[in-house]
Image: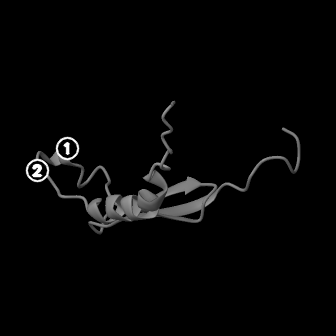
Amino acid sequence: MKEGIHPEYKETTITCVCGNVIETRSTKKDIKTEICSNCHPFITGKQRLVDTAGRVERFKKKYEAKVEKPQVKKTTKK
C-alpha cells in the first residue's frame, strides 16, 4: 500500500440513546446514534416513537416563505 494516502483507522466507541455502547474501529473518533441493534423496532418487536416532529416543523418553517407563488398580473385584450 502507498504511504500517506489512507485515513487513520482507530478505536471507536458507538453510543446509542438507549445506553448501548459498542467498541469497534473506524476513521471517525466517536459516533452517537439514535437506534442500534439492541433497541431497533424490527429486532425488539416494540414500536418506539422517534422524535422527527421537530425536524419536520423546522423544515416547514424554513421553506414556508419560499413556497409562496409570485402573483401574476392578468391582462385582458380589448
SS class of the residue under badge 2?
loop
Mark 1 lies on a secondary structure that is helix
Measuring 45% from the left and 58% from the top, which residue is drawn there?
A: 63
User: Left or right: where does residue 16 sit relative to residue 9?
Assistant: left
| Residue that carries the numbered disc 2 in the rendered image | 46
- In front here: 68 or 56? 68
Tag nearer the camera, 1 or 2: 2
Mark drawn on residue 13 = none
In the image, residue 58 lies at what x, y percent? Answer: 38, 65
- Residue 77: x and y, percent? 51, 30
Q: Residue placed at 59% from the left, 65% from the top?
A: 29
Marks 1 and 2 close (CB-CB < 8 Å): no
Residue 23 lies, with reference to residue 6, above or below; the image says below
Front position in the image: 3 or 17: 17
> Which quadrant of the rendered structure holds the N terminus?
top right
Whether residue 61 is visible to the viewer of this picture, yes or no, is: yes
Give the amino acid type for the residue marked by disc 2 in the picture: Lys
State the residue lying farthest toward the top. 77
Characterize the local packing of mark 1: few (<14), some (14-19) or many (20 or more) Cα atoms within 10 angstroms. few
Q: Which residue is mark 1?
A: 43
Horizontal placement of 54 versus 71: left or right? Answer: left
Q: What residue sits 63% from the left and 59% below the top?
A: 10
In the figure, is residue 28 to the left or right of 65? right
* Mark 2 surroundings: few (<14), some (14-19) or many (≥20) residues within 10 A: few
| Residue in the foreground of this view, choosing between 19 and 11 | 19
In the image, what residue type sits under mark 1? Ile
